[in-house]
Image: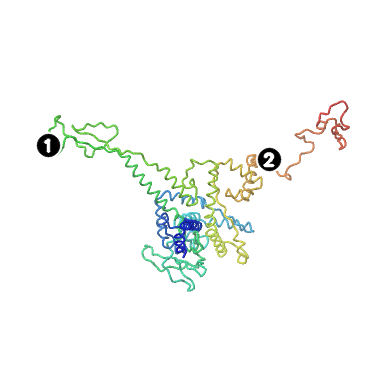
Amino acid sequence: MGNVLDNIIGFISPAAGARREAWRQYLDEQRHYDAGGYDRLNAGWVAYNQSAEQTDRYSRDTIRARARDLERNSDMANSVIGAYRRNVVGHGYTLRARTSNETLNKQIQEAWIEWCKRKNCDVTETQSFNQMLRMAERRKKVDGGILFKKCYTSGGLLPFKLQALEVDELDTGRAAPHNPKHRVVGGIELNTYNKPMGYWIRQYNVDGFGQIEPVYVPAKDVIFYFTKDRPSQVREMSDLAPTITRVRDANEFMTAVSVKERIAACLAVFVKKIIPTTGNFARGVGVNDGRPREDYDGKRISPGMIKELNAGDEIQVVNPTGQATDAASYIKLQQRLIGAGQGLSYEATSRDMSQSNYSSARQGIIEDGQTYIEDIELLKEVVMDEVYETFIISGVLSGLFHIPGFWEDKQKYFKHEWVAAPKPWIDPAKEATATKIALQTGQKTYQQVAAENGKDWKEQIDETVAVLEYARSKGIEMGGVIFDRTEAELTPADEQQDPEPGAASDGPTDQGGGNQPPGQQPGSQQQDGDQPAADGGEGQQEGKPDKGI
């Protein structure tokens, strides 16, 4: 109806029709997103709104396979993976049990250190707990996630070990649920709220060919470590997905540049023969010098060689010319974009600090740390805390820990914290000064400073006291080295020895008037009323100027 009306108005009054059309186009621009248009630039951009699982299921296996290929063959992809492994797990974490019983805390911590050894924590006895955490972070970046199955078996410190499973072992072809009220999606059995209730794990023969019926494992015995980005997401997706194509392009570019540079570095020599070596004409030509003709087949050029050619032969050198492509700037840009796609700075992935100073390096570390903290938080809550709670329960059931009333208040005995290994300082002098100022001004507590250094603050104080006491027993005062204080300043007031009667002191004494105010007799005390008068007061002598204080 609008088009008919516009046509009528335009026929009667072209000016009015033109104004209506101009305002109509302006109104369309106000209600239009360029990103939602289907113009020439967006004609090939096809996108649909679907649930996360419906979107991921068709590309998950392909993306995982390509990510693993880059893991094996791309140094640029491994720079991203390595950055996460170093900063999320690194040297591992130290457990600090936080129950109200210090003796129990020490017993738990000692048992945890022993359990983390490969013979106690891994069902295959090939990896320690820290090594399993590093593998978990690597598999999360490449595969999208990893599963840990709790195995209650004998043969270790506790009847509890972990079995690492790849996400490929989830039986995606399973349709029949273990519980008729549930449904199976991607090998995971879900209830009506999409909460995982169990996992269907594929089973293989030792030779890897024959397939056995999958095994159902309850969700309480499985730890699934992956990042959930959408509410409808059920399974994992490779963290490298946004940057896989860019990494692939950079690798292909470097391969092409390498081939070109190898060709450009080649030097070839061709022998141009003026006199033919075959045919009737050649048989009619004799050799005047009596020497047989030289055959160049299989000959190579060596440095400093002197060679005589046959009569009439000429050397022509093939030396590919042309300036090599400046690949450094292109690769630098690509690596910067790849790092940005993973939330990291260029320096974190390339390890190139040539254009960084202290301030920019510190800022980069802070921003990268905000990226790593997401994976650190997920790793602690999903994997480490769950493993620790199962470790405590197994210890109680096996009799390793004797905790009366444990089952009435388990959460009280689950309290703990993880202390990360300290990171080396960029500029120790500046870092130490900043820490000292933050501690003295109350911006940080001693507990925080100790935790940043990967230490327990109580243990750090005990170690410091042990050093000071041992040094004093050997006749050495270490207080000045550690705290920049003298022995008297470090000794508490109640432990300081009073001077013996009659002992001479280091400072001046009151005897003989050597320490009396001017004009006061030895042994006398100056009263409050005897203070010198102020300006113009009675204490000023007449005829003498007031010199002040």
Q: Is residue 545 above or below residue 134?
A: above
Q: CA distance from mark 2 to mark 1?
A: 110 Å
For this orientation, the residue located farthest to the front is 12
Quadrant of the frame with the C terminus: top right
Q: Position of residue 336 (x, y in %)?
A: 46, 47
| Crowd band around label 1 with a 10 angstrom C-alpha radius: few (<14), some (14–19), many (20+) | few
Give left or right: position of 312 versus 411. Answer: left
Q: Amino acid at mark 1?
A: Phe
Give left or right: position of 94 versus 531. Answer: left
**Dividing the picture into quarters, in which one does residue 494 lie?**
top right
Q: Nearer the viewer, mark 2 or mark 1?
A: 1
Q: Is residue 120 visible?
A: no
Say what secondary structure mark 2 lies in: helix
For this orientation, the residue located farthest to the bottom is 180
Q: Position of residue 244 (x, y in %)?
A: 42, 53
Q: Amino acid at mark 2?
A: Glu
Q: Position of residue 49 (x, y in %)?
A: 46, 62
Front residue of 242/190: it is 242
Front residue of 174/55: it is 55
Q: Quickly name the residue at label 1.
A: 281
Q: Is residue 273 above or below residue 67?
A: above
Q: Quickly name the residue at label 2.
A: 487
